[in-house]
Amino acid sequence: MKPPGAINGSRSLLIVDDEPSVTLTLKLIFEREGYSVVAAYSCAEALMLFANGHRYDAVITDLNMERDDIGLEVVRSAQTLDPRPVIVICTGYANVENATQALELRVDYLATKPVDLEELIGALRRLISRRAAARGSK
Amino acid sequence: MTATAQHRGLALVVHPSLERATALHNACVEAGMRTVVARDLPTALLMLSQHVFDAAIVSATISEHADGWSLAAVFRMIFPGAFVAVLAPERSLEALKNAINSGADQIFECETTDDEIARAAAARLVKAASGSVQ
């Protein structure tokens, strides 16, 4: 049985951003790339999805939503999931402090806005493939 | 015998400065590791193809500005469970972003002592060997 979030065998992606225009744009772009995309508009909503058993191949989260750097809570929660998704932070407010925390939390990719979409799409594809290969070899 | 000595992990040390590379090698040996030392990118890549490494300590700049990050990324791809540390001039946002996106575990500023870097690598190897690190 597929976990909730993985639809029709396509790669599943959760986008967490409180800015609807950003969420919608990323959703359209990644759906065009073949992902099944779910959007959450706050950290709380993302944590609720995880708590309800939804699982994703990758999570892209903003940092500043209900409060500054709360996206790191999404990261912490995603880290505990099994299987652990690829975790990407996409933010316009990266600084040494939150990037240090992201490194310590083993975030897989840090994208700073304005995002280079080709680079983000390529990185996500590469990280998900590598994660799948690692799982397959276990 | 200590856990560190028992493990004897193999570390790749890459630094263009002979003096620094030697000092890092000595510190790693002192911390209970074996090392392979390279001072340029081609040698480092050749060594990647010929050894199974547990750790890498890489200068952010080897031959050209920031080429060490690329080596760190390749190392991470080949050895996904290994410890990767990069020596960068400063702990800037750019360096942190490079570290995350190349899969490095830790950044050390260049002025960090060799002993401190080697001890951190050895500690991670011992944790990994005891199963407490991914």
Image (cartoon, rainbow, N blue to C red):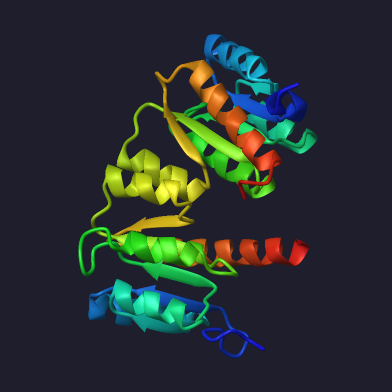
Left or right of B61 on screen, residue A15: left
Which residue is nearer to you in this view: B48 or B31?
B31
Which residue is the extreme one toward the top? Answer: B19
Residue A91, given in percent of the width and then of the height, sits at: 29, 60
Do we see residue A132 in this rendering? yes
Please report the residue visible at 70 percent of the width from the left and 39 percent of the height from the top.
Answer: B129
Left or right of A95 on screen, residue A133: right
Quarter where residue A61 is shown: bottom left
Which residue is nearer to you in this view: B64 or A133?
A133
Please report the residue visible at 31 percent of the width from the left and 66 percent of the height from the top.
Answer: A62
Residue B50, given in percent of the width and then of the height, sits at: 79, 34
Please report the residue visible at 64 percent of the width from the left and 49 percent of the height from the top.
Answer: B77
Which residue is the extreme one toward the right? Answer: B50
Identify whether B15 is placed above or below A128. Answer: above
Q: Quadrant of the N terminus of chain B?
A: top right
Which residue is the extreme one toward the front? Answer: B1
Left or right of A137 on screen, residue A60: left
